[in-house]
Every structure is written in structure tokens, then in C-alpha cells.
Amino acid sequence: MKSAKTNNNSLYGYRCEYCEGTVRPKKVEQEAFKHKKGFIILEDVVIGVCDACGARYYSADILHAVNDIANGTKPFERIEKIPVAHLSPP
């Protein structure tokens, strides 16, 4: 999970750290985050996405919200069930 630059003027438009692409804002319907206490899904959130390789970047505000929700200091709207399967080697 990469954190975007914190200055609002430089939140987007900078060079991707993995390629020669440019990080652009993109509104996504759902973005899942793995946290030490489980998974958090944010809906209708704007993140940074590289226009060449698709690497995703998150503002400090988004990462703090994920942490606060996981720790119970920020309320969430609902709980979703996620299917889990164990695949044994053939």
C-alpha cells in the first residue's frame, strides 16, 4: 500500500515509482484494504492510479480512515460477508 504525497497540490500528476507513467485521480466504486485486524472496503473513493501500469496510490486521509475503522474509532456502515476457500495442491 503506497501513500500518496500529502500536499493537496501534488496529490496527483507525479511520476509513478514503478514506471514512466503519471499518477492520476480515479474514483473507484470499491477499494479493499488489508489491515492487521482484517479487511476494510471503502466505497466511492478517489485514489491515485498510474495511467501506464495501474499502480494504486492512497492519500494519508484514506489510510488514516482505514486504520480508524479497523480500530473502531470511526464508524462503518455495514459488514459484508466474503467467501473464503482453501485450495489444496493437486
Image: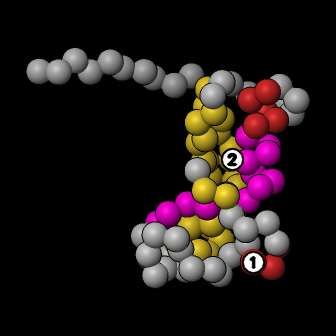
The picture places residue 79, in percent across and down from the top left corner, at 68, 24
The image shows residue 3, relative to residue 12, as above or below, that is above
Residue kind at label 1, given as amino acid type:
Ser
Point 44% across, 75% down: residue = 19
Q: Please tell me which residue is depicted at 73% across the width and 68% down the height of the picture.
A: 5
Residue 21 in the image: x percent, y percent?
A: 48, 80
Q: Of helix, strand and loop, which one carries label 2?
A: strand
Which residue is label 1 attached to?
A: 10
Q: Is residue 56 magenta?
A: yes
Which residue, as the protein is rendered here, is positioned at the far front?
17
For the record, the magenta segment spans 54-66
Of residues 1 and 42, which is closer to you in this image? 1
Q: Quadrant of the C terminus?
A: top left
Task: Identify the residue at horizontal 52%, vertical 71% (top origin).
Answer: 17
Element under disc 1: helix
Looking at the image, can residue 76 be seen? no
Residue type at mark 2: give it.
Glu
* Residue 48 lies within the magenta run: no
Quarter occupied by residue 36:
top right
The answer to whether residue 71 of the structure is visible from this angle is yes
Nearest to the eye among marks 1 and 2: give it.
1
Q: Is residue 29 left or right of residue 86?
A: right
**Who comes first in sequence, dot 1 or dot 2?**
1
Gap between marks 1 and 2 measured at Cα: 23 Å
Left/right placement of residue 46 relative to residue 52 reads: right
The single residue placed furthest to the left in the displayed view is 90
Could you classify mark 1 by the number of other residues whose Cα lies within 10 Å: few (under 14), some (14-19), or many (20 or more)?
A: few
> Residue under circle 2?
43
Q: What residue lies at 59% left-to-right and 42% top-to-bottom? A: 32
